[in-house]
Image (cartoon, helix red, strand yellow):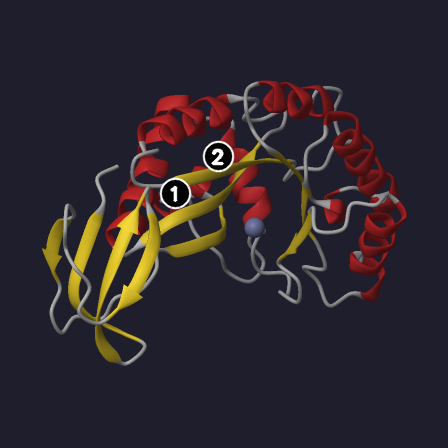
Amino acid sequence: MKPLFLRGGIVDGRRQDVTIRDGRIHRIAPGLDAGEYEVLDVAGKLVLPGFVESHIHPDKAFIADRTQGLAPGRPTPQTLVAELKKTFTADDIYRRARRVMELAVRHGCTTMRAHVEIDAFVELRGVEALRRLQAELAPVLELRLIAFAQEGIFHDGVTQGLLREALKMGLETLGGCPYMDRDQRAHIDWFFDTAQATGVPLDFHADSSDDPALLTSDYIAEQTIARGMQGRVTLGHLGLLDVLP
Ligand SMILES: [Zn+2]
C-alpha cells in the first residue's frame, strides 16, 4: 500500500497533517513534510480513524422483503430466519453480504467482525460466501469471521461437525448461542472445550433476555478464568430484550 499524506485535515479539533504507512496512521502533526508520500488534500475536513463494526450478521441482511415481518402473535425473528435459511444459496448470501459491506466501507468502516451462521439449514453455504468476500475485499476491509451456532448445537447431529469444518475452512473464531439449547451450560462447555482443542477465541451471544433463568454471562466469565482464556472471549447482545437474534 502506497504511503499517504493527508494535508490539513481537522484532527483533535485543529488543522493537522497525517501520514499513513502500511494502512496504519504513522504521524499526526501540523506542517509535516509530504516528501515521497502521495498527497491527498483534506483541508478543513474532519479526519477520523477507520470505523470498526464489532458485531454484524451480513448473511441474513436484506431479507425483510421475503417475510411478512414482525408483529404480535407472529413467529419470532429466529423462526422466520430459520425457515428462510433453507433457501439461501452461497451466491444469494454473497450478493446480500457484499451489499452490506460496500455500504459499510463507503461510510468509513475498515474492520468488521461478522457472524456466519452454521447449522443444518444453511450448512456451510454462508462460510463459502463470506470467505470469498473476505479475500475479495481484503484491500479495503479487514473482515474477521465467526463460526456462529445461531440454532444451538444439540438439536441435530451435524452442527458440531460443521462448526469444526468451518474452522478448517479458515474461520478464526467460534461463536456460541447458549439460549438456543435447553442445557445452556453444556452448550458453553462444548464451546470452551472445542476452542481449547483448536486454539481459537470465542464469541457468545449471551443474556439476550430479561429472564434470569437465561442469563449465562457469569458462568462464561467463570469458565474464561478457570481455563485461562482471559482476553480471548467476547460477549455480545448483553441486555437486549427478546427482539433480535
Ligand atoms: Zn448478533
Q: Residue visible at 86% across and 48% down?
A: 223
Q: CA distance from mark 1 to mark 2?
A: 9 Å
Q: Name the mark on residue 204.
A: none
- x 34%, y 60%: residue: 49
* Residue position for label 2: 84
Q: Give neighbour class at mark 2: few <14, some 14-19, many 20+ (Cα, 10 Å).
A: some
Secondary structure found at label 2: helix
Residue type of the residue flagged with mark 2: Leu
Picture coordinates of residue 118, whole percent (x, y): 59, 29
Q: Are marks 1 and 2 in contact (CB under 8 Å)?
A: yes
Q: Position of residue 234 (x, y in %)?
A: 66, 51
Residue 75 shows up from this direction: no
Quadrant for residue 236, please give it.
bottom right
What residue is shown at x 83% (from left), y 45% (from top)? Answer: 228
Q: Quadrant of the N terminus?
A: top left
Horizontal relation, residue 223 to residue 121: left or right: right
x and y percentages locating residue 182 in the rendered image = 83, 43
Between disc 1 and disc 2, whose residue precedes?
1
Which residue carries the number 1 mark?
63
Q: Is residue 161 above or below residue 36?
A: above
Q: Is residue 121 left or right of residue 91?
A: right
Q: Amino acid at mark 1?
A: Ile
Depth check: give the residue in front, 64 or 151.
Answer: 151
Horizontally, is 187 left or right of 33 in the view?
right
Query: Which residue corresponds to the image point at 77% horizontal and 36% vertical from the top-left?
Result: 191
* Element class at badge 1: loop
Q: Residues within 10 Å of mark 1 (few under 14, many from 20)?
A: few
- Residue 70: x %, y % from top left: 49, 56
Q: Is residue 2 visible?
A: yes
Instruction: Report the side of 147 relative to 230 (left or right).
Output: left
Q: Is mark 1 within 8 Å of ligand 1?
A: no
